[in-house]
Amino acid sequence: MAPGDESQSLPHVVVVGGGFGGLQTVRKLRGAPVRVTLVDRQNFHLFQPLAYQVATGALSAVEIATPLRQILRRQKNADVLLAEVTGFDLERRSVRLDELANGEGGTDLSYDTLVVAGGSAYSYFGHDDWAPFAPELKSLEGALELRARLLTAFEAAEVEADEDRRKAWLTFVVVGAGPTGVEMAGQIAEIARGTLRHDFRAIDTRTARVLLVEAGDRVLATFPARLSGRAARSLERLGVTPVLGTTVVGVTADGVEV
C-alpha cells in the first residue's frame, strides 16, 4: 500500500478523509521523510462550498469533484486508498478497513502517525425523520438528488392541470438563512426567473415562490447587520421571500409546518 518499496522503512502517516483538512495535511507532508496513505471512501475531493450550484444546475458535478489521485499525482510520497474506515486499534496502531475496491473487507492498515479528518455528519437538529424529505447539501449525492427534485418540480408543474397543485409544485422552501441557505434560495430564484423562463410552455417559471424560513430576526445573523440588510434586499430583488422569526417544527412529503 506504500508508494514504493524503497520507502517502506520510512515512518508511515495514515490520513483518514480526503476533504479540506485531510488533503491539506497530505500536501503539507510533501517532501517530508515519510510515506503517506490517504484513505477515503470516495476517490475524489468535493469542494463543498459550491455544492449548492450543482444542486441548482449552475455547475456540473465534475466541476466541484476532483479525483484525489489527480491532485496528488506529483506527490511521490503519497498514495490513495479507496476504502471505508470502520475502526481504530490504538494499541496496535492500525486502522480497520472495509469495502475495498476489490470487494475485500476486514483489512488492517498499520501506521506510525494517524490523522483523522473524516469530516462531519449532517445534522437535522434532532429531527432525522426529516431527512427523506430534505436531502442534505454536503455531499455530491445530496446535491444531485436536490437538483433532480428541483427540476422535477418544474416538470410536474408543467403537466399539472389543478391550479392549486401547480402552485404547490412551484413553491420552494429553504430552511435556515445562513450562508448556504441564502445561496441556495437565491440560486433557485435565479433559475426560476432567468435560466428556465423560456424552457416551458404551460407555466411561467417566474411565478415560482421561494421562501427562506429563518428562526432569527434577520438573514445571515452571524454577519454585521449592515451586510445582513443588504443581503435581504438582494434576495427580495431576486424574488426570494424571507420568512423571519419563524421556526420549522415539521417537514413532510407535502409541506413544512412552522
Image (spheres, rainbow, N blue to C red):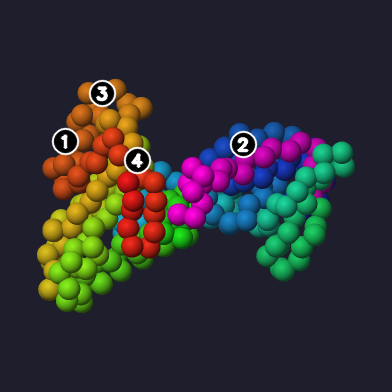
Q: Secondary structure at mark 2?
A: helix
Mark 3 against mark 4, which lies toward the viewer?
4
Q: Is residue 51 above or below residue 34?
A: below
**Magenta segment: does it hold 125?**
yes
Q: Nearer the viewer, residue 95 or 168?
A: 168
Q: Which residues are magenta?
A: 109-130
Q: Position of residue 104 (x, y in %)?
A: 76, 66
Q: CA distance from mark 1 to mark 4?
A: 21 Å
Query: Which residue, given by chain and number where applicable, does mark 1 sit on?
Result: 233
**Magenta segment: does it hold 173?**
no
Query: Which residue, given by chain and number where applicable, does mark 3 sit on?
Result: 225
Q: Are marks 2 and 4 in contact (CB under 8 Å)?
A: no
Q: Residue at x 75, y 55 (%)?
A: 97
Q: Nearer the viewer, residue 30 or 252?
A: 252
Q: CA distance from mark 1 to mark 3?
A: 12 Å
Q: Amino acid at mark 3?
A: Ala
Query: Which residue, given by chain and number where applicable, does mark 4 sit on?
Result: 247
Q: Residue at x 28, y 35 (%)?
A: 245
Q: Position of residue 233 (x, y in %)?
A: 16, 35
Q: Secondary structure at mark 4?
A: loop
Residue 25: which numbered mark, if any? 2
